[in-house]
Every structure is written in structure tokens, then in C-alpha cells.
Amino acid sequence: MYLSYLPVIAHDSLLFKNVDDEGVNGIIRIYDDVKNLGKQIFIAFDKQCSYSQETYEILQDSCVLQLDGDGHELYDKSWNREATNETQL
């Protein structure tokens, strides 16, 4: 990311699944540093409370959009619930 001319990076939370907690903390610190280069990073991140306080604070300070259940889904629709009829699709 430091050497690339690409202005953004984006990835899903699956990237973090096979990385230990310290590794994730390090990646988030690098992502936080990269913003000083004028680059943007878009990630989907699960369970941010499972990591260090520093990681939690970086994620909270950098968060633009946070999705969650109980009415905080994108477009008010939960992707993991089955519709009971076609009008709910």
C-alpha cells in the first residue's frame, strides 16, 4: 500500500478470519497510518470488541458506516432472514 499508486483498498471480513489477534491489530494500525498518504480503505469488520482497545478506537474513529441487526441493516433488510411471502422481498 505504501508503494502502490492505487488510491483505495477494499476487502471483506473474511480476510481477517485466518489471522491471529495481534496480526489483525497490526493490520489495523497500518491501515490507520495509510490514511496519512491520502488513501482510503474500506473493510467489513466483525467483532471489533474482540481486539485490542487501540484497534477498537481506530475502528470507531474511522467508521463511516456501521451495520447491525435490529433495524440497522442496509436498506432495512436482513440478508439472513427468509421472506415469508413475495411482498417482503
Image (cartoon, rainbow, N blue to C red):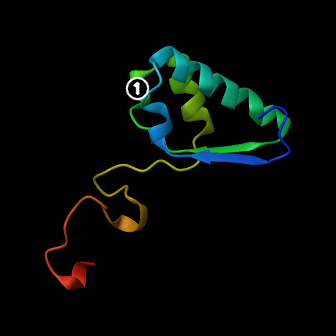
Quadrant placement of the N terminus: top right
Of residues 42 and 74, which is closer to you in this image?
A: 42
The amino acid type of the residue labelled 1 equals Cys
On screen, residue 19 above or below 63: above
On screen, residue 73 above or below 37: below
Q: Which residue is mark 1?
A: 49
Mark yes or no: residue 21 visible.
yes
Identify the residue shown where x is 22% and y is 62%: 81
**Image quarter for residue 75?**
bottom left
Q: Residue furthest front?
A: 18
Task: Name the side, left or right, on which 24 lies relative to 50.
Answer: right
Identify the residue shown where x is 53% and y is 23%: 24
On screen, residue 29 above or below 63: above
User: Is label 1 in a helix, a strand or a loop?
Assistant: helix
Of residues 50 and 18, which is closer to you in this image?
A: 18
Residue 47 position, x and y percent, is 38, 32
Residue 8 position, x and y percent, is 73, 48
Identify the residue shown where x is 45% and y is 40%: 14
Residue 36 position, x and y percent, is 81, 32
Identify the residue shown where x is 42% and y is 50%: 67
